[in-house]
Amino acid sequence: MGFLTSLINVGLLFALGVPGYILGKLKMLPGGFSDGLATILLYVAFPFVTISTFIRTDFDSELLVNMGLMVFLGIALLIGSYYISLLCFKPLQKSPAQKAGIASGYMSNSAFMGIPIIQTFFPDKPAAVVYATMFGIAYNVIAWTLMVYTLTGDKKYISLKAALLNPGTFSVIIALPILFFDINFPDPALRVFDWLGNLTSPLAMFIVGIRLADIRLHTIFTSIVVYWSSVVKLVIVPLFSFLIIFLTNLFLPMSGVLAIVMYILMMMPSASFVIVFSEKFGGDRDTSVKCVLFSTLISIITIPVMLLFSGALF
């Protein structure tokens, strides 16, 4: 993918967040507004974009294999990225901030930003979003186990139940029979599914804009952990992921779309879940917020740069 084309597409996506940023800065939104939008995104938009996409995807054995491969490789890449981030942060003193930096260094915002970007780059390939939703299963497993442990250092907070029982997994469970049995829906129902699913990109980026408005940007540039976590997340982890995907493709040839979707999801900025989990489990929420927002800001440049390598995955 060309740098300029990628930059324009990513820039247009980020432009969706400008109204949220402006309204947030003008203090025109009630407290907790972004959390309410995130709930709608998580429980309405994501499930319906999954269902709508699965309806429009033609099922075959290759697709099924690729879906399973996405879950398996997704877990492997996230675990590998964890060790990369852990190694990169080893020279820093152990602290809650360091733990937040490690988590921010390997957990991608694969849902809130990944799916909108996949939709932008693959508007005519519904299978791309199918693969992205399967990655979400791998992501949730790692989030509720390894990421929780990263932030707390205590295994008692690990929840396999939450890793498997969540809106993302439920939407895939609902959508799979539709895909396997080629279940048809009347046009009015499809239009409703599409409308609700199309909320994904605007809502996701609107939330990003609001969250950027919530913090004084100059405070982001005060911590080595924030800088280093963004380098790890946006440069080192994507290059590691590219290498693993490229080598895997040599010995286990996979669909070009599958390979690039996996690569794109791994180059996303730090996950919003790092903030949520830091707050939930007593981690360093302040550092988590700074890591996520800083990586999100500079990803508008790093994503197009990293996409220059994507041609080697076809």
Image (cartoon, rainbow, N blue to C red):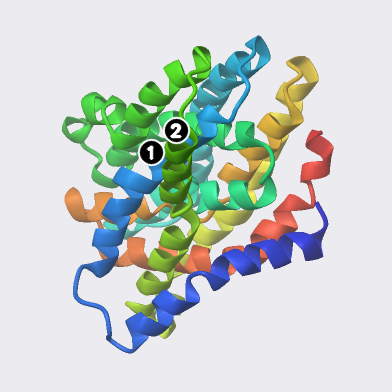
Residue 97 left/right relative to 195? left
Furthest residue toward bottom: 26
User: Which residue sits at x=73%, y=59%?
Assistant: 6
For mark 1, does the 10 Å Cα neighbourhood hold few (<14), some (14 to 19), or many (20 or more) residues?
many
Q: Quadrant of residue 223?
A: bottom left
> CA–CA distance between discs 2 and 1?
6 Å
Note whether 250 is above or below 23 in the view shown.
Answer: above
Note whether 104 is above or below 126 in the view shown.
Answer: below
> Can residue 146 be seen at all in this image of the molecule?
yes
User: Which residue sits at x=42%, y=37%?
Assistant: 189
Q: Position of residue 13 (x, y in %)?
A: 58, 64
For mark 2, does the 10 Å Cα neighbourhood hold few (<14), some (14 to 19), or many (20 or more) residues?
many
User: Which residue sits at x=50%, y=32%?
Assistant: 135
Residue 239 left/right relative to 171? right
Q: Position of residue 238 (x, y in %)?
A: 63, 46
Residue with the mark numbered 2: 51
Residue 255 left/right relative to 18? right
> Can residue 237 be seen at all in this image of the molecule?
no
Element at badge 2? helix
Note whether 59 is above or below 15 in the view shown.
Answer: above
Q: Position of residue 87 (x, y in %)?
A: 50, 43
The three-letter amino acid code for the residue at tag 1 is: Pro
Quarter of the image containing the C terminus? top right
Tell me the number on the disc at residue 47. 1
Element at badge 1? helix
User: Which residue sits at x=46%, y=64%?
Assistant: 205
Residues tagged 2 and 1 counted as in contact (Cβ below 8 A): yes
The three-letter amino acid code for the residue at tag 2 is: Ile
The front one of 247 and 204 is 204
The front one of 278 and 226 is 278
Tell me the number on the disc at residue 99. none
The front one of 17 and 275 is 17
